[in-house]
Image (spheres, coloured by chain):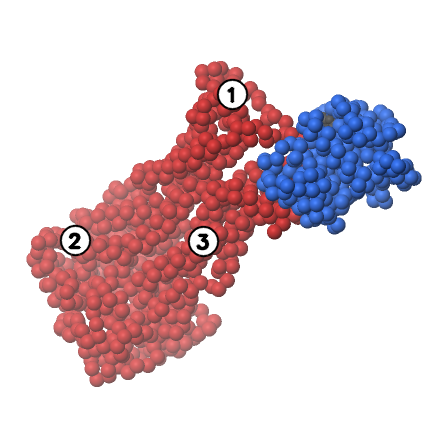
Chain colours: A red, B blue
Amino acid sequence: MTALHHKLFRDLGRMAGQMTAITAVLACGIATYVTMRCSYDSLLFARSEYYSAYRFADVFAHVKRAPEALARSIAEIPGVAAVQTRIVTDVTLDVPGLEEPATARLVSIPARRVLLLNDLFLRQGRYIEPDRRDEAVISEAFAGANLLKIGDSVDAVINGKWERLRIAGIGLSPEYLYEVKPGEIFPDNRRFGVLWISRETLEAAFDMKEAFNDVSLSLAQGASEPEVIERLDHLLEPYGGLGAYGRPDQISYRFIADELTELRAMGLILPTIFLAIVAFLLHVVMSRLVTTERSQIAVLKAFGYGRLEIAGHYLKFGLLAALPGSVLGIAGGLWLGSLFTGVYARYFHFPVLRLQPEPYLPLAAAAVGAGAACIGALSAARRAVALAPAEAMRPESPEKFRAGILEHSGLMTWLVPATRMIVRNLSRRPWKALATALGIALAVSILVVGRYTIDSVNYLVDLQFRVMQREDLTIAFQEPRPEHARYELAQLPGVLQVETFREVPARLRFGHRSRKSSILGTSREDTLRPLLDRNLSWVEVPAEGIVLNSRLGEILGARPGSQIQVEVLEGARPVRLVTVAGWVEQPIGLGAYMQANALHRMMREAGTISGAHLKVDSTQAARLYSLLKRTPSISAVAVKDVALASFWKSYGDTIWISTTMLVGFASIIAFGIVYNGLRIALSERGHELASLRVLGYTRAEIGRILLGEQGLLLVLAIPFGLALGYGLSLLTSHALARDLIRLPLVIGPVSYTYAAGIVVAAGVLSGLVVIRRLAHMDLTEVLKSRE
Amino acid sequence: MSPASELTTRANLAGSEPVFHIHGVTKVYRMGDVEVHALRGVDLDLYAGEFVVVLGPSGSGKSTLLNILGGLDVPTAGEVHYLDHQLTGAGDAALTRFRREHVGFVFQFYNLIPSLTALENVALVTEIADHPMDPEKALRMVDLGERLNHFPSQLSGGEQQRVAIARAVAKRPDILLCDEPTGALDYPTGKLVLDVLDRINRDLGTIAVVITHNAAIAGMADRVVRVGSGRIVEITRNERRLLPSELSW
Ligand SMILES: Nc1ncnc2c1ncn2[C@@H]1O[C@H](COP(=O)(O)OP(=O)(O)O)[C@@H](O)[C@H]1O
Ligand SMILES: [Mg+2]
């Protein structure tokens, strides 16, 4: 080892505390990078494997009832590679051990196994036997949640008749990668599942002989999706087509695509922030080091060490701090990545989802770490290189003090000497003070952002499930029913309040933008599903016009007053121009709302209802549920509390893992910044403080000067950091906004307190370390050094 | 013949061809609007093997001259030649190579690397030199053979300065430039250090240029250069070069 390397390692040893702090922050940055990247890589890999091996379709469409012969015309659309017609329908299901009715999506499969679009992956058991019409393949998530095994049976109300279905196999399909009840966002695998049963069974039960109500297409290379969709819509329209759509509007695809986008964004943003902080910390520490080693650098130069050797020497400090940080970060990131993929495997149902980082990921991560370290050490290294050796040999001239405003104001005379020194020192180097304060503020802000996710999800859940959904139960009818069905519902045991709704699928257009959504007809007396604006005041749906979810409005580019085109995809399929009357703020979904009467008028129908929200007496719930299970006309029942519980059950862990990671990392970063700031201050002021000690100041007094100064900066920086954190959270909320779910910008007082508290704790702990150093300060040694 | 007179002769014999030749060197420092003329036209030749003492009051430009000689600094105007190399106008890389190959520095405040032991401080220089001595031998030459693994903070000022001298000579430089090497030392320690410098100059034949404001030291030189206000006021040759032990101040 060369002498210069001896120096390097001894210097590093002397700065162990600071370097450890920097290494820790760097490890956090690299860990987030690796976590996000390898989760991203793994999901992406699993998805593309799954999609190609099981032939995920490109275009999807539902139709009321189309003759099977139409399939041939569909296949003749230019660009269509394969056509798969099916019967798909939702029914209620009685699952052993489950009080509430579950919803099953029944999907037809041919009696004999052939290659299908959206094919089945069989996890257990076997495909249905051709001559056994009561057999079903059941989705793995549903089977798992309800502890259903091969050979078990479930009862389904299939078109008014009870059918007992025997489970022959447990499987998955890329179409239900994310398995969620139609119209919902969060999966509830106990109460929603997919059952694949034979086409003949469904044909017979739903009167669909030689007919289909669902079609999927795969496209040939180079086919134009919009053109195919247009032609398909044209073919299906006479048969009640509900509008074809491509993968982006397919719910499973949408969810995984959003997740991938988010992972990629966060995998870029978070590490960038963290590594920028690493660079900042290294910059401060290394600049200080070069200042203290000024004359050593001059000696090296005097004896003929060249630019490269000197630059290399100081860059190595950064690289050596980066090395363990990268190793730690890569290992930690892979571990967190395996946790993440484990969590993802709970909602994204792949045949296999393994941690599958790209082979170059560790290298890339190490390079990123080294890059951040080099950027941080670069300016210090450049200063070392640029240092004029002759210059550096002479002692630095004393720092310039000028009487500033504070001095002239006479304020200073009021302060005790120690305080005077603090104020003078801060005002003497305002930029330095500002940089320190900025560092602390940054630490606070990252903590705020970390907490924001927690607060936001809590708020969202509360808003969605308590404020915006006041019902206990929602019922959806298989077919629209006459209005008097409301009285039947009211008669059911335990039903306290019934509010019916009309919901029609529609395509909304404004300019060249369009979006499939559904229009909900509401009535003035409704209280269970309040429509609220951003201030949580009720929004009135006017007699004419339509009220849009603000996100939907944004997507369409429409504003209140705009005329949008509504193309209803049901019944007589009217197309109308409607004025946007206002916006509602909803964190979930993309709804559009009209008065029920206006909607009926548009549909040219008398009072028809699609479903109802119910308030229920909880003591009677069990009886009600068992009745509902047996009601054939109902396709879905959603129990709110159950949905809420299942949300926490499925999402609780994810939120916990990701926010713990973020808050944990933010806390480490906060410590790193505050501790380093204090150590730098100690190094800069050591000489002066030792002089004071020689003059008879006690340790406590000089401790107060040093800590007072940093403490003052800390206190000043915290409010600024809180504000910065709010701003960063705002950016994050925009970055994370998806079409179907938006995290509202909510940060509670607890979070602000937490952020400030962690930083104060970091300050106190670092202060203790520094006080110990002050206690061990060798006065003669400090005074001997010229610095 | 005494070793001292032998060297004097050698210096005189080499007289025809100077190792260093500087001509018309000026140095102006600009500090804002103020110009400080540190050197105002200096001519000087240095010959192989000679021991030169540069005398002058504080602020007279001694250090500036030394730094320019050693390639640590460049003159504002004038020429500096080392043998057949022109140092004026040479770039940073060339000056660095010049320092690396030919020059040994000793500074008033020793400037040892505090995180390196005595031995490592010397090795720091021998590692990048072409024909260095063994660092241990260099330290033995300055009577520090027993303190190889001590850190600077564990050595006295005189010992530190001797380590600095060992560091400067271990690369076998052609010229040893010492800027007030005894300035921070007490009388006996200072004499000890001068003795080491004298011995090295005699034994290795290295040109030694020693800056001092202490006139008594001039006695040990072959030649004495007196500077004042950025100019060479006078150059004298000592008839007899004294041993450091013969000096007193
Ligand atoms: N870097 C510098 N900037 C400005 N003035 C300088 C600088 N270096 C030296 N000087 C000035 O040049 C003059 C000569 O300095 P120096 O060579 O150090 O003198 P000496 O070594 O004889 O004490 C002094 O007036 C000094 O203040
Ligand atoms: Mg000087």
Q: Is residue A318 above or below residue A34?
A: above
| Residue carrying label 3 | A329
Q: Give the image location of residue A608, x and y in percent.
A: 18, 60
| Residue carrying label 1 | A695
Tell which subunit mark 3 falls on.
A
**Residue type, mark 3 in image:** Gly
Which sits earlier in the primary sequence, circle 3 or circle 2? Answer: 3
Q: Quadrant of ligand 1?
A: top right
Asked if disc 3 and disc 2 are in contact, CB closer than 8 Å, the reply is: no
* Residue B76 quadrant: top right
Residue A578 left/right relative to A783:
left
**Residue type, mark 1 in image:** Leu
| Residue carrying label 2 | A472
Q: Give the image location of residue A201, x and y in percent.
A: 21, 78
Give the Cα distance between marks 1 and 2.
76 Å
Which sits earlier in the primary sequence, circle 3 or circle 1? Answer: 3
Q: Give the image location of residue A737, x and y in percent.
A: 37, 51
Q: Nearer the viewer, mark 1 or mark 2?
A: 1
